[in-house]
Image: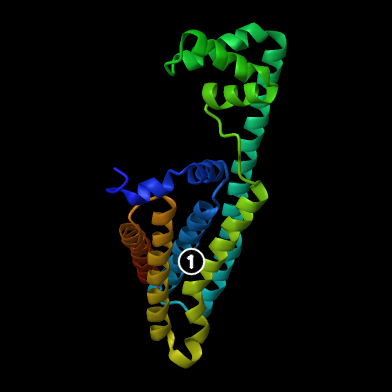
Amino acid sequence: MSDSHPDLSVDHTPRAVASRLAAATEHNYLGDFVLGAIDGTVTTFAVVCGVTGAGMETGVAIILGLANVLADGFSMAVSNFLRTKADREILEQARQTEERHIEAIPEGEREEIRQIFAGKGFGGEVLDEVVEVITRDRRRWVDTMLTEELGLRLETPSPWRAGLVTFSAFALAGMLPLSPLFLAGPLGPGWTFRISALVAAATFFLVGLGKGRSLNRSPLWAGVETLLIGGVAALLAYVAGAGFQGLLAP
């Protein structure tokens, strides 16, 4: 088996296993970055497409695009901040509840530990020893109840870091399809829109690659999928802009 799967053997040495288990308890902010970047690219390029479809001036697209980067980016960051903050508060509230239960009815809480691990296949003296080891340490006892009974993660992301990563990704990705519009003077609006579309497509694809890696999916397929989704959003915005242009025409 080791000869057939050398990589698996390397990944399952005691040191590699310990390192992987330690890393699993840490929050990966790549997902926050990818989601922020996808939303930033989609919404900002949608603004560019909508304004172009409506036949408006390039300056309008720049103003609306910058407003979108700041307002929508801030809104998304605040939403992520509040979500992660709520997750921390739920964890802390649950911890306090379990602490009170252990203090008030320790035997009942021991029975919960016993039934949890009996359900995992432990029994007899081994089960007694498992219960004894876990309930001997109050912190370990509470942590076990949080993860096994309530299904909570003990490590939650920093709300401030999650919000900052989301806003940074939104602003960075959102500015990419907007940046060619600042060259509208020397290049003309037609060329700047084409360049913006190419930049947006490349951004969609690269962000999709990152999304695929963060979700352990095929990076190529994730890139194509994100490109298609972004393309549909851009097309809808362009068609809507063109429709409004017809309505507003004298």
The quadrant where residue 64 appears: bottom right
Above or below, 43 against 103 in this view is below
In percent of width and height, residue 200 lies at 41, 71
Residue indicated by mark 1: 44
41 or 247, nearer to the observer: 41
The residue that appears at 70% across and 19% down in the rendered structure is 99
Secondary structure at badge 1 equals: helix
The answer to whether residue 149 is visible is yes
3 or 60, nearer to the observer: 3
The residue that appears at 49% across and 61% down in the rendered structure is 37
In percent of width and height, residue 155 lies at 61, 39
The answer to whether residue 250 is visible is no
The N terminus lies in quadrant: top left
Residue lying at the far bottom of the rendered structure: 186
> How many numbered circles does the render carry?
1
106 or 238, nearer to the observer: 106
